[in-house]
Image: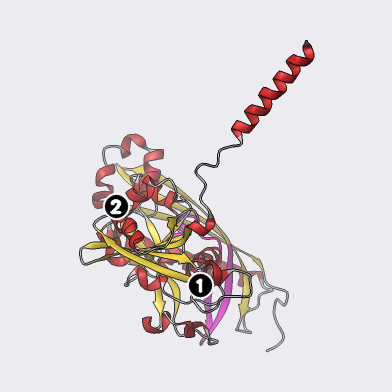
Amino acid sequence: MSTIRERIQKALLLLLCVLMLSGCWSRRELNELMIVLGIGLDWEDGEFLVSFQVVNPSEISMMPKGGERPPMTLYQSKGKTLFEAARSLTAEAPRKVYMGHLQIYVIGEELARMGISKFIDNSLRDNELRMDSNLIIAKGMKAQDLLKLFTPLERLPTQNMLHSLQTSEKSWAPTVSVNLDDLLNKLSTHGDELAVTGIQLVGTKKKATSKQNVETYLPSTRFRYTGIAVFKTDKLVGWLNEQESKGFTDISGKLKSTSIELPCGENSYIGIEVTSSDTKIKMKIKNGQPEAHIDIRAESNIVDRMCKNIDLENPATIQQLNEEIKVVIQNNAEASIKKAKKLKSDIFGFGSTLGKEHPKFWKPIMKEWNEEWFPGLKVQYHIESHIRKLGTTSNTTMY
């Protein structure tokens, strides 16, 4: 009797397992999908222009074939809404659009100045889009022009842009990566405005779309990250230059590494590599007015010594260099804050920090923060600089 019961139990368990494993009703085969890696968004003739950069699988596979077509195809369409523009692509696209591997959004400057809230609303409603996709702004140009570029090393322009953004953020201060998740947090927080890295073409647009662009040692047309776009709510209102961008990444705690050049003679410099930077912001209330206190602690190494009269083995010299580094860091920070105040956009999050530390003071003024309080905000700087390494040669004897 027990044996029959055990057999029935095993049969029911097997049936249950089979039912749980039969969930392939929603599958989509790779040869039925059009994989999108990059999206360009522009405003043209009163409508949204959407550009999808799509992979040509045969051109990027490891098989010994292909090479006759570009590694990607650009599909474009217009619409009164982003959804209409995307759906109208089906009139010419041979496969269903798949967004699961989307890497980067490029937004044209004209559209960014009009506002990006419509783009954000559409993206958040699509459960297929990834929130870790990065966002960049096409400075002074349309996004579609960047997605047509033939790039070296990486065959797909979006991969090249993404890897360059990630690398430069770690090693070069004037760039910062922003994904959709960061974007959502910024737009939903009072007192902390959005700042996004800009990108533009170097060279001519005509040669950018030809394979010949990557058949020379130095491509005639290439992209370069330049400046940081400053937003107010969801609209682009201005740009930070290189110095101001360095100040922004330092104050906001996003600086990982950068370089500083200290003059030591005619056309001669001491090269400094900043290896780490730690920033803390505190807000205080004095005489009924908010004050920002910025503490920056930087560590660095000597990487270039072009002046032989600079004695790196003398502690007084190191102290002097530390003082000069502090001046450069503060100048960058002051330039960045000055530009942000002029644009009336608190991209540093001073207001948000004020709300956390002094909520009673913040609540009545948060709606007027950018216009009335931030431009007159007093800022105090407390900067430390520590040179840790002089290199293996110290005072070189080569000259």
Q: Is residue 40 above or below residue 191?
A: below
Q: Residues within 10 Å of mark 2 (few under 14, many from 20)?
A: few
Q: Quadrant of the C terminus?
A: bottom right
- Residue 253 position, x and y percent, is 49, 55
Q: Is residue 342 visible?
A: no
Residue 270: which quarter of the image? bottom right
Check disc 1 and give the amino acid type.
Answer: Pro
Of residue 97 and residue 231, the one placed in the foreground of this image is 97
- Tell me if residue 210 is in the magenta stretch: no
Q: Is residue 357 above or below residue 370?
A: above
- Residue 86 position, x and y percent, is 34, 57
Where is mark 2, residue-wise?
Answer: 118
Residue at 65%, 69% in the rendered image: 315
Of residue 361 and residue 228, the one placed in the foreground of this image is 228
- Tell me if residue 257 is in the magenta stretch: yes
How is the rendered protein coloured?
secondary structure
Specify start and end residues of the magenta stretch as a single range: 249-275
Q: Nearer the viewer, mark 1 or mark 2?
A: 1
- First in residue order: circle 1 vs circle 2: 1
Q: Secondary structure at mark 2?
A: helix
Residue at 48%, 68% in the rendered image: 161
Q: Is residue 129 visible?
A: yes
- Residue 204 position, x and y percent, is 38, 83
All told, the count of numbered labels is: 2
- Residue 31 position, x and y percent, is 52, 59
Check disc 2 and give the amino acid type.
Answer: Lys
Q: Quadrant of the N terminus?
A: top right
Where is mark 1, residue-wise?
Answer: 71
Residue 220: which quarter of the image? bottom left
Q: Is residue 33 above or below residue 310?
A: above
Q: Secondary structure at mark 1?
A: loop
Q: Residue furthest bottom?
A: 399
